[in-house]
Amino acid sequence: MTTEGNGGAAGFRAAIRRDLALFAYHESTPLTPAFAVRMVLLTQGFQFVLARRIQDALARIPVVGRPLRRIWWWWTCRKFGSEIAIGCTVAAGLYIPHPYGIVVGVCTIEENVVILQNVTIGSRHSHSPGHARIGRGAYLSAGAAIIGAVTIGEGAMIGANAVVLRDVPVGAVAVGVPARIVGAS
């Protein structure tokens, strides 16, 4: 499911199931109803992802949906101290274990992406053409910064505090400031 699209309540539930499955995988825990309840009630990372899914669902309500979405977005930013831009496209299967200091501008996040604390995804300046694309299964370590209209390839890993200014190929590992490719994941 993307921000702009797939089908109503069924798409919403499918995205939540994919998010829960990814949380269970990373926590080496079976996906049970008790696990799901724990995630919803006690895990801020999952609550942050769920808040984004609710935001996307609100946008589909006729007439009042867009203003409600903006209010919900504002509340989510204040509650978690993190932001995923309204214009960001987020596919199902997002794992954010620690939703602290995350700033995600307009970009595309594909399926099964991991984003750790203090990650920034943004443009080089306010009038930059294009936006970043985070490929399926990418892993963005703590403090990583993805700056500009770059593509992070499928399965790529970005090291802690790396500053990515250029595309990262599929399956590559990028570290440093500015980031350089040091191997394969």
Image (cartoon, rainbow, N blue to C red):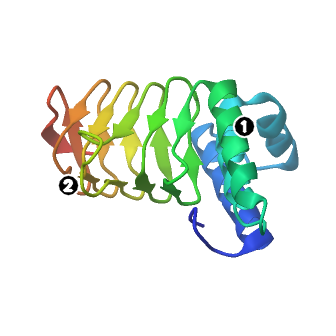
108 or 157, which lies in front?
A: 108
- Image vertical order of residue 96 relative to residue 64, above or below: above
Q: Residue at x 41, y 31 (%)?
A: 119
Write down the residue under mark 1.
47
Residue 68 percent across, percent down from the top left: 75, 50
Q: Quadrant of the N terminus?
A: bottom right
Q: Are marks 2 and 1 in contact (CB under 8 Å)?
A: no
48 or 65, which lies in front?
A: 65
* Label 2: few (<14), some (14–19) or many (≥20) C-alpha neighbours in 10 Å: some
Of marks 2 and 1, which one's residue comes earlier in the chain? 1
Residue 181 percent across, percent down from the top left: 14, 41
Helix, strand or loop status at disc 1: helix
Residue 67 percent across, percent down from the top left: 72, 52
Kind of residue sitting beneath label 2: Pro
State which quadrant residue 46 falls in: top right
Helix, strand or loop status at disc 2: loop
- Image vertical order of residue 82 relative to residue 134, above or below: above
Write down the residue under mark 2.
169
